[in-house]
Amino acid sequence: MADVTESELVVIGAGPGGYAAAFLAADRGLQVTLIDPAAKPGGVCLHVGCIPSKALLHAARLITDAREGEGWGIHFDAPRINLDTLRARKEKVVDTLSGHLARSAKDRKVNYLQTRATFAGPRELRLESGGAVRFQNCIVATGSSPTRLPHLAVDSPRVLDSTGALALEDVPPTLLVVGGGYIGLEMGTVYAALGSKVTVVELMDTLLPGVDPDLVRPLANRLKGQFHAIHLSTKVTALEKVPDGIRATLEGEGVAEPKTTFAKVLVAVGRRPNSRDLGLEQAGVEVDAKGFVRVDERRRTTNEHVYAIGDVAGEPMLAHKAAHEGKVAVEVITGEPAVWEPRAIPAVVFTDPEIAWCGLTETEARQQKREVRVARFHWAASGRATTLGRPDGLTKLLVDPESDRLLGVGLVGAGVGELIAEGVLAIEMAATARDLALTIHPHPTLTETVMEAAESLHGLATHLYKVRKS
Ligand code: NAD
C-alpha cells in the first residue's frame, strides 16, 4: 500500500494565491503542506509572468527613456544590447525572489513538496512522486494556462506563448503578436524596444477590449509610433511553417498583405483555468461551464473540506486577487468570520503609458444605465507630468451623484500602476470626492491629479477652469 501522510491543510499550487494562503495558515498554527511541480514557490507570476515581464519592461523603459533624452538635449548612442546579460539579469530577479519565498516557507515549517497532486477522494490526494496525503482541508490554487487556438497550433519553436516570449531566446526581426490584451501589449512593448518590428492583430475593434476607450487612446497613440502595425477587427486564420519563418494569414479590413511571413509569433489570446486533470470529480468539486471551480463568498467549493482561490476560481485572473482570496480561505478554515467582498480590485497594464483602474468603470456604468458624475483631469494641466515630458495622461473619477461617494477610478499615464492604490483605499473606505479634494497631496506629484479631479467636482480645482454657463 502506498505511503499515506496526514496534513491539516494542503495547498495545491504555490503561486501568489497558494503561498500567501500556506504562509498565513502556518502563521496561524496549522500544519501545512504546499504542493507544486516547481522547485521553489512563486508560480506562474514569479517564474514566467508578472515578475520577469516587469524586469524586461524596465529594460524597455531604459531604452525608450534614453531615446527621449534627445528632446531634453541629452544624446545617447543607439543601445548595444547584450541579450545574455539581459536574460541573466531577469533570471537573477526571479531567483532572488523565489529564494526568499523558499526560505520563508522553510522558516514557517511549511512542508513543500515538489510534485503534482490529484484528488483520489473527498479528503485524499495522490502524489505523482508516489504516496498520498490525507487532509482536513485543502485549498486548490492551481492557476491558469495560456489558451491554445487549435487552428494556430503549429509545432515550431517560432510560435511562442507568454513563457516562450519571456525566455527571450533572441530578438526576432519581425514579431506577430496575436491578441491585443495585457500580455500581447506588454510583451510587444518589450520586443519593440529591443528592436523587433512588432505587428499586433486583435480580434475586437479596440486594443484591451473592455477597458474604457479614453484610457486606451493615449496608449494606442503611443504604440502606433512604436509598433510596425496594429490591426483591429482582424483574425489570424492560419499559421504555417515556411523556410524563413511563419506565414500568417490575416483576415480583416485594412490588411494590405493578407499573407505575411514573420520570424516569430506570440499567441496571447487569454488564459483558461487549470481545473482539468486534477481529479476534482473524485472529490465532488464542481466546475462551471468555463472550467472555473465553483466557490461561494467564503471560497468554499461544493466539497466542504475543499476551497479554491485565484485564477482557477474565477475572473479577474490577477495575482493580488488570488493572494487576498487565499487569506480569506485560511481565515474561514481557522474559524474567523471572513468573506470575500472587495469593493474594488485594481487592474494594471504595465505598458508605457500604463493603464490602471479599479471599482466601477465608465463602460460598466453605461451598460448598467447607472447615473454617475465623471471627473476628468488631463495631465497636460499637471505640473509634474509636464516636468516628466509626459502630458499624455488622464485621471478619471466616477462618483455617485447623490452621496458623492467614489465608485471608480481610471488612470492612464506614466507610472499610474503606483497611483491606483489611493483609489482602491478610497473606495474601500467609502470616501467621497470631497474627502479626496480635502486631502492635501504633495506638490509637484502625479498624485495631485487625483485630488484635482475630485476638486473639479466641487468647484475647487486650481488648474482646471470651466466658465460656468449661467
Ligand atoms: P487578455 O484577455 O488580456 O487578451 C487577449 C486578447 O486576445 C483579447 O483582446 C481578445 O479579444 C484577443 N483575442 C482573442 N482571440 C483572438 C484571436 N483569435 N485573434 C486575435 N485576437 C484574439 O489575455 P492575455 O493577454 O492572454 O492575458 C491573460 C490574462 O493574464 C489576463 O486576462 C490577465 O488576467 C493576466 N495578465 C495580467 C497582467 C497584468 O496584471 N499586468 C499581465 C499579463 C497577463
Image (tube, rainbow, N blue to C red):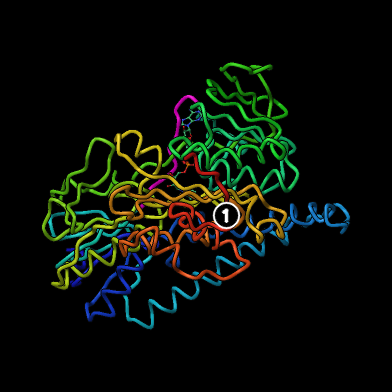
* Range shown magenta: 143-151
Element type at marker 1? helix
- Residue hosting label 1: 53
Q: Residue at x 36, y 47 (%)?
A: 360
Q: Residue at point 21% right, 62% down?
A: 138
Q: Residue furthest front?
A: 470
Tally the numbered discs: 1
Which percent across, then down, holds residue 448?
55, 62
Q: Residues within 10 Å of mark 1 (few under 14, many from 20)?
A: many
Q: Is residue 146 magenta?
A: yes
Q: Give the camera-side residue of 360 and 273.
A: 360
Name the quadrant of the N terminus. bottom left
Q: Is residue 102 left or right of residue 443?
A: left
Type of amino acid at the residue the image marks with label 1:
Ser
Indicate left or right for 177 with 274 as reference.
right
Camera-nearest residue between 191 and 456: 456
- The reply to whether the residue tagged 1 has its Cβ within 8 angstroms of ligand 1 is yes
Is residue 316 within the magenta segment? no
Q: Which quadrant of the structure image shows residue 435? A: bottom left
Q: Is residue 425 visible?
A: yes
